[in-house]
């Protein structure tokens, strides 16, 4: 409890300093290409995407999550195409389109957009911060309320998949703050803004807040969620879920099976070739 109080005190100070400096409360601007041909900027912020949709100038939002996720909640007017099928959609070769997912699969999504551009889909882009940033910056969502709330959380399967490969910033809000799992990646809460400023990228950076069991993380998320340049997620069910998952992996490995996962919420036991 004392640790949580200390964290929140530091967070409050961080938030006040951020507002005092007059830092923007929306994604950093990304220069817009004048024409569809020659699009070179992969990451587009929410404001830019909204502006183009309002102009009705041909931009299309392509949601690359699974169909069940899309049916539960989505951006109005978006279409659902699994990412591995995008390259088969010839109509996308002749128009600008923005890929959208939950927002934390940055490295994976950027690599896929680069492949599409190299393959002739010169209008391919990605929206910084994904559905979570869209919602937080005033974009409407269709569908059920509960799936919209689930956008705040990263499932343990995706957390494990991206822990070593994704360029997330991880904030350790566990009681002891001595997790060997997070040791090489965790940033103290009072150094978060400096870390974001140091990154100097033209997109939102996913910040993953991790606590012991997912119970205390909400207050931390809400406090640092106003920090400029970040889109904040909590690890679903905390490190408790992580350790349970690792134990399950060990048990399955002993039985000759594996658990495969990839960014975006795809994972299945015993399926080494699943996407």
Image (cartoon, rainbow, N blue to C red):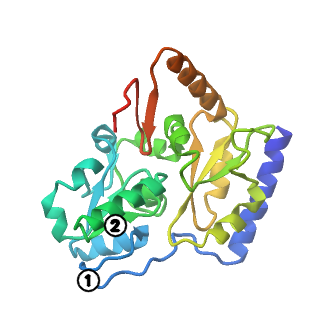
Based on the displayed image, in which of its 4 quarters is residue 67 positioned?
top left
Q: Is residue 69 above or below residue 213?
A: below
Image position of 78 (left or right of 175): left
SS at badge 2: strand
Q: Residue at x 65, y 50 (%)?
A: 170
SS at badge 1: loop
Q: Which mark is residue 125?
A: 2
Q: Nearer the viewer, residue 144 or 29?
A: 29
Q: Residue at x 31, y 44 (%)?
A: 70
Q: Nearer the viewer, residue 231 or 25?
A: 231
How far across and how far down the image is residue 154, in percent? 52, 42
Neighbours of disc 2 within 10 Å: few (<14), some (14-19), many (20+): many
Neighbours of disc 1 within 10 Å: few (<14), some (14-19), many (20+): few
How far across and how far down the image is residue 185, in percent? 68, 50
Distance, label 1 to label 2, CA atoms, is 13 Å
Dot 1 or dot 2, earlier in sequence:
1
Q: Are marks 1 and 2 in contact (CB under 8 Å)?
A: no
Image position of 10 (left or right of 146): right
Q: Residue at x 77, y 59 (%)?
A: 190
Quadrant of the rendering where the C terminus is positioned: top left
Based on the displayed image, in which of its 4 quarters is residue 97 positioned?
bottom left
Residue to which mark 1 is pinned: 35
Q: Which residue is at the far top?
A: 255
How far across and how far down the image is residue 11, in percent? 75, 57
Q: Which mark is residue 222?
A: none
Q: Is residue 92 visible?
A: yes
Image position of 256 (left or right of 89): right
How far across and how far down the image is residue 110, in percent? 41, 61
């Amino acid at each position: 409890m004392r640790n949580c109080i200390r964290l929140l005190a530091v967070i409050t100070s961080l938030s006040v300093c951020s507002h005092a400096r007059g830092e923007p409360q929306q994604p950093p601007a990304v220069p817009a290409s004048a024409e569809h041909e020659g699009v070179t900027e992969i990451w587009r912020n929410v404001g830019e995407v909204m502006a183009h949709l309002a102009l009705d100038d041909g931009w299309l939002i392509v949601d690359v999550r699974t169909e069940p996720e899309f049916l539960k909640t989505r951006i109005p007017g978006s279409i659902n195409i699994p990412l591995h099928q995008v390259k088969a959609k010839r109509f996308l070769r002749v128009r600008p389109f923005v890929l959208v997912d939950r927002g934390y699969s940055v490295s994976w999504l950027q690599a896929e957009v680069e492949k599409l551009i190299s393959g002739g889909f010169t209008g391919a882009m990605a929206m910084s911060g994904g559905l979570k940033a869209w919602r937080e910056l005033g974009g409407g969502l269709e569908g059920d309320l509960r799936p919209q709330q689930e956008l705040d959380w990263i499932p343990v399967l995706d957390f494990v998949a991206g822990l070593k490969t994704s360029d997330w910033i991880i904030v350790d809000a566990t009681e002891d703050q001595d997790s060997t799992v997070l040791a090489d990646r965790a940033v103290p809460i009072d150094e978060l803004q400096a870390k974001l400023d140091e990154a100097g990228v033209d997109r939102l950076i996913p910040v993953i807040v991790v606590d012991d069991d997912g119970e205390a993380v909400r207050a931390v998320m809400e406090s640092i969620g106003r920090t400029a340049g970040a889109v904040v997620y909590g690890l679903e069910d905390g490190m408790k879920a992580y350790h349970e998952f690792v134990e399950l992996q060990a048990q399955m490995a002993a039985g000759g099976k594996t658990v495969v996962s990839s960014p975006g919420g795809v994972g299945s036991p015993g399926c080494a070739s699943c996407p």
